[in-house]
Image (cartoon, rainbow, N blue to C red):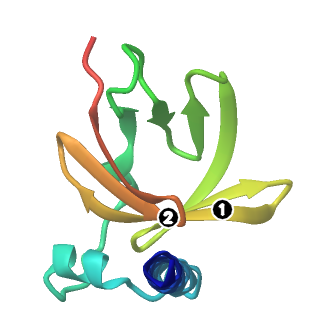
């Protein structure tokens, strides 16, 4: 019986440790600092992107449709057919509603074929949608 209690206690300690690491990662992103995962992908250099790098129709491949279309000043979420205004600063997309920023996502990679973004939900890889 002691072994079961010891095993349960060890599992509890491990789960608390994992949750603490996840919370630190989220806190780092919200404070506009990079997590080790993102830093390793950028090789320690700060990359500057432009709107032209991120504009276009993107898909995650989760469905046969495009996920969203980034236009000059708004993003069309295809499934919801909803437009959200945005600002783009250096490497960060800032979603705006009623002139108030409400969500940020960081662009890790943007080239002619792929877009990698990061926010509190994790890292998302997308590619240009082609009919």
Q: Looking at the rendering, in which quadrant would you find the C terminus?
A: top left
Residue 109 higher or lower than 66, as above or below: below
| Residue 25, image x, y percentages | 47, 81
- As drawn, is 27 to the left or to the right of 43? right
Q: Residue at x 45, y 84 (%)?
A: 10
| Residue 6, image x, y percentages | 47, 85
Q: Residue at x 36, y 33 (%)?
A: 58
- As drawn, is 128 to the left or to the right of 82? left
Q: Which mark is residue 119?
A: 2
Q: In which image quadrant can residue 43 be found? A: bottom left
Residue under numbered circle 1: 103
Kindly report the distance in space between the C-alpha atoms of the residues bearing marks 2 and 1.
9 Å
State which mark lies toward you, 2 or 1. 2
| Residue 20, image x, y percentages | 53, 85
Q: Determine crowd level at label 1: few under 14, some 14-19, many 20+ residues with C-alpha closer than 10 A.
A: some
Q: In which image quadrant can residue 128 be found? A: top left
């Amino acid at each position: 019986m002691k072994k079961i209690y010891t095993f349960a206690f060890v599992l509890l300690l491990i789960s608390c440790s994992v949750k603490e690491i996840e919370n630190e990662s989220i806190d780092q992103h919200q404070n506009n600092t990079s997590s080790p995962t993102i830093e390793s992908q950028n090789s320690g250099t700060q990359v500057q992107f432009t709107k032209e790098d991120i504009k276009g129709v993107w898909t995650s491949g989760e469905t046969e449709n495009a996920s969203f279309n980034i236009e000059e000043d708004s993003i069309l979420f295809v499934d919801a057919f909803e437009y959200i205004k945005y600002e783009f600063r250096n490497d960060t997309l800032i979603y705006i509603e009623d002139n108030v920023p409400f969500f940020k996502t960081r662009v890790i990679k943007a080239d002619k074929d792929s877009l990698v973004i990061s926010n509190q939900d994790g890292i998302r890889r997308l590619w240009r949608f082609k009919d």
